[in-house]
Image (spheres, grey):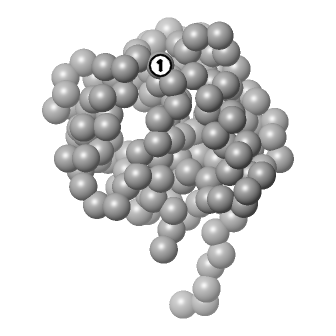
Amino acid sequence: MAQREILLVEDNPADQALCREAFAEIGGDIRLSIAGSAPEALRLLADRVATGAPLPALILLDIQLPGISGLDLLSRLRADAHLGLLPVLMLTSSRHLSDVQEAYRLRANGYLVKPFDYEALRGLMARVAAFWLDDVLPPGAVQTPA
């Protein structure tokens, strides 16, 4: 079975809780891991690479993080031989054109603006999970003949 883990990199405890609740309501076998900062996310991912543990199927990444920004983390991920192909969606409140353009320049797979309404957030997370965990063939996936 394909890996069904999403890593949320988000420093705001309220946003973490809302996402955790949304994925719990969506149900299924989705595992949501949370890193509260870019260094925490890098440590988690480096530990996985070092131990051969599965990497998350998708990273949801906030831009405004303490210390190392989400855009800087995205740049580091894309430069890493083991992590560079991980799907990364920016999940942020920023609608600044410069942020959107920089995220795509750094090869984000998508840019999502956090809805202010919980029901809208839950709907967005359901669509994200359905597409990225069910429909998309991840990098490195082995295809068997039909």
Residue 38 lies in quadrant:
top right
Image x and y of residue 82, in percent: 78, 50
Residue at horizontal 19 percent and vertical 28 percent from the top: 118
Image x and y of residue 23, in percent: 29, 45
Residue at horizontal 74 percent and vertical 52 percent from the top: 49
> Are there few (<14), some (14-19), or many (20+) residues within 10 Å of tag 1?
some
Asked if residue 69 shows in the view, the reply is yes
Asked if residue 105 shows in the view, the reply is no
Residue 137 appears left or right of 19: right
Residue identifier under label 1: 11
Residue 102 appears left or right of 89: right
- Identify whether 6 is placed above or below 119: below
Q: Which of 137 and 10 is in front in this view?
A: 10
- Identify whether 41 is placed above or below 116: below
What amino acid type should be assigned to the residue bearing mark 1?
Asp
Residue 54 lies in quadrant:
bottom right
Image x and y of residue 121, in percent: 26, 32
Image x and y of residue 138, in percent: 59, 60
Q: Nearer the viewer, residue 102 or 47?
A: 47
Q: Nearer the viewer, residue 55 or 132?
A: 55
Q: Nearer the viewer, residue 43 or 98?
A: 43
Residue 71 appears left or right of 50: left
Residue at horizontal 51 percent and vertical 68 percent from the top: 2
Q: What element carries label 1?
A: loop
